[in-house]
Structures are given as structure tokens and as C-alpha cells.
Amino acid sequence: MLTSVTLQNFFSFCSKASVPLSPAMNVLVGINGSGKSNFIKALRLLYEGISGDGLRNLIQLEWGGYDQITHARAGSTGVISLTFRFRPRLDNSTQNNGHSPVYAIRLQPQADGTFTVSERITFSQTNGTEELFFESRAGEGLIRNPGGGLVSLTPETGNRAEPARMELRFRALPPESMHPMLVSLRQAIRQFSFYGFFNTSYSSRARLPALPAGHYGERLAFDGRNMSQVLHSIRGYHPDVFQELVSFLRRISPNLRELLFSESKRGVSLRLLEKNLNHSVSVRHISDGTLRYLLYLAIFLNPARGLAVCLDEPESGLHPDMLHTLSEAMTHAVQDGTQLIIATHSPLLLNSFELDDLLVFDKSPENETLVKTVNGDDLSEITGLSLPGQLWLSGYLGGKRW
């Protein structure tokens, strides 16, 4: 999906930094505060701006205002620049004739504490040039129409005033006004999914009967509230995948016989049938770790998981002996065409990946995020070590305090 993200003046990223991404597995490693979560926030900004609750809600309400998301050295007057480069094949069917989309977003602070947005979408040509397909600044600009012509954007009704000026114009353009490659790009951005630390306490919404969760549809919602419904849907529409999912669960819960579902007006309820027990166990009463593992299976083994999945510290709350099977579930998703971006502090989880999968996050003397890739062949020859977790703990990769 994405080939790189370039960030400037965004949270811990000050000077322009370009982060390359693999089409498959991307594992972010580094100390707390090095910028891993901030990188994922850049991806979430793109998603929320196009498919979520919008930039105003994300920046002004959730993140605390524009001055909270700029690098402190640049100050609240600094302009934020984010550029997302995509692969020609946005999904499993669309290749955009070999042209790679580039979506640049620029946020400009205003004296009243708000901000304005400008956007530019180009498609890289095979000869290295870039062709403009969309541009918007203060609500005015150009767009490539379905026939391939570049025309002026239809003026918006009224003034480009708050809150409209703080939103992406590309978000709301009617599909019939856009070139098919622009339509494909917007559809692809809507296929991002983001997950952090799941609440698995007794009051967790993941333990309750589940209904479809809004715009997530068949994907797991960010808080897991539709987990039972997602698993039930996989069983109904993808029975082979469901049996594989049950096999994964049996590897960490060998007494499991089957997953049982019941439907009511409240939604779909999940129960676990185990060996040598007279009755099944409601998902309300399974262990936190088992529930957390089920949530990850509902992501990675779900054919409707999306084109790109971002996770922050998936090892949290799991017994160490579950991490290898968790990595195998991740590999299943990658082999099915999903790009994974995962931040972790677990050397055991790192040992399940290749060195070339890693992106190492550090802080410069000027206190800004630096990101580097890893050359696995060179390191193994120098150190005699081959496991990424070993190399990280030994200090050969960076991303450590000492």
C-alpha cells in the first residue's frame, strides 16, 4: 500500500524525515518517546481526515490543539507537512497503470489557534515525472475529472470558514467528479485499521454481545466492541478461515473444543466450549490474555481486515509463549496482501521477524526522531548473531538507552 511517509514538524519529527515502508511487514522498535507512536499518528491523521471523524475532531479535540502536535523546537507557528507515497497496486485489483499516487498534506496554523489545510495529489509516471490530479488550497484548486481533463474545483458554498477550512477537501468530493484513479486512492485510504491497547477488563465492550460497529463494517472496531460479530461473520462467510482461526486458538488453549455463537436482539454472543466441562464458558469470563489473543485473531485472520493495519505494542497483556503464534497470525495477514505496521518493545516478538522488517527509532542530540533501516546480512556477519531480539538487546541495532 504505502512505500514511504515523509514528515516535517509533526510531534517528535522536526526536520524533514522520509520513512521507507515494506509492502508486507514493518516492525517499529525503539525506546519509549522515540517517536514510534507519533509515526503511527501520521497515518491515523490521513485515515481520520478521509474516512474518520475529520481533522478538526482529531487535532483540536482529541490531540489538544495544533500547538500540541508541532515539534516544540519549531513552535506553534510551524507548518506541518506530511507526504504519503503509495504503491501502484493500491489493492488486490487496481494497479493504476503503474502510476504511484503521492498525497501531500500541509497544515498552516492561524492566529486564533486553528489551522487551514492544503492538499496535493500527484501520480508518479514511469519516466520519473509527476502528473497533477488534485490540488486544493482554501477550498479552491484543480481536479482531474473522469475524462482525464484537469478542471477547476467547484467552489464551496459560503465561506471557507471554521470548521470546514480544517478538513480535507478530498474527503467529501463526489466520486462521479473524480478520475477513477482518485476514486481508487480514496477507497484504499479507507482500508486502514488502527489498534492500541485493548481494554479486556470485566466491563470491556469486547465481552458484551456485539452488533456491527459503524463504518468499520466487517472489520474489528478500534476497541474490539464488535469482536463476537466479526468472528461470527468469518464463520458464516469464510468457514475454512474460521477453522484455521480455531486451530490458532487451540494452540494457546488446548482444552478448547469449539467456539459457539448465539444471536439475540442485543447482538451476537460468544461462548467457548472446552473439554471435560459440563457447560460452555461465556466470553465474559475467559482470561484477559485469551480475550486479547482472540481480538488479534479477529484482526489478522479476518479477510476483511483492510489493506493496512497499524498496531501499538501487541505483546501487552500476553503470556510470552503466545507471541510466536501471534507472529504467525501476523504473517498470515501479510501473505494475504495486508501491509502491517507494528510498534513493539518485545525481543521475543522481534525474534519472529527478519532484520529487514525492522525500522529503528532513535532521538538525535537535538531531540528529534531519527529512523533507520537495518541491513541484516551485514549485521549477522559482524556479530555472529541472527535473531533481531538478540541484536536489539545487545545494542547492535540502536533504539536503546544503553
Image: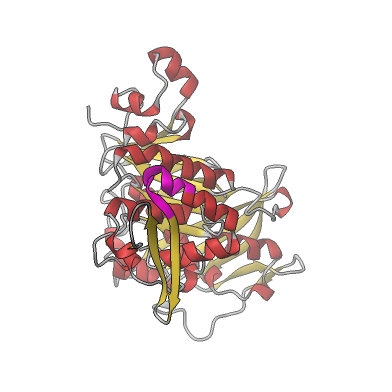
Residue 241 in the image: state x and y as whole percent: 56, 53
Whether residue 117 is visible: no
Residue 148, located in which quarter of the rendered image? bottom right
The answer to whether residue 97 is left or right of residue 389 is: right
Q: Which sits in the foreground, 156 or 39?
A: 39
* Residue at position x 70%, y 65% in the image: 180
Q: How is the image coloured?
A: secondary structure
Q: Is residue 256 left or right of residue 105?
A: left
Residue 98 appears in view: yes
Say if the magenta span includes residue 252.
Answer: yes
In the rendered image, the residue lying farthest to the bottom is 158
Q: Residue at x 68, y 75 (%)?
A: 176
Q: Which residues are magenta?
A: 247-257
Relative horizontal placement of residue 13, taking residue 192 as reference (left or right): left
- Would residue 203 be found to the left or right of residue 306 on screen? left
Which of the pair 21/105 is nearer the observer? Answer: 21
The structure residue drawn at horizontal position 58% and vertical position 43%, both measured from the top left corner, is 335
**In front: 224, or 156?**
224
Q: Split into 4 quadrants, where in the image is the C terminus?
A: top left
Q: Magenta span has 245?
A: no
Q: Position of residue 365 (x, y in %)?
A: 26, 34
Q: Is residue 343 above or below residue 113?
A: above
Q: What residue occupies the far right of the structure in this picture?
A: 147
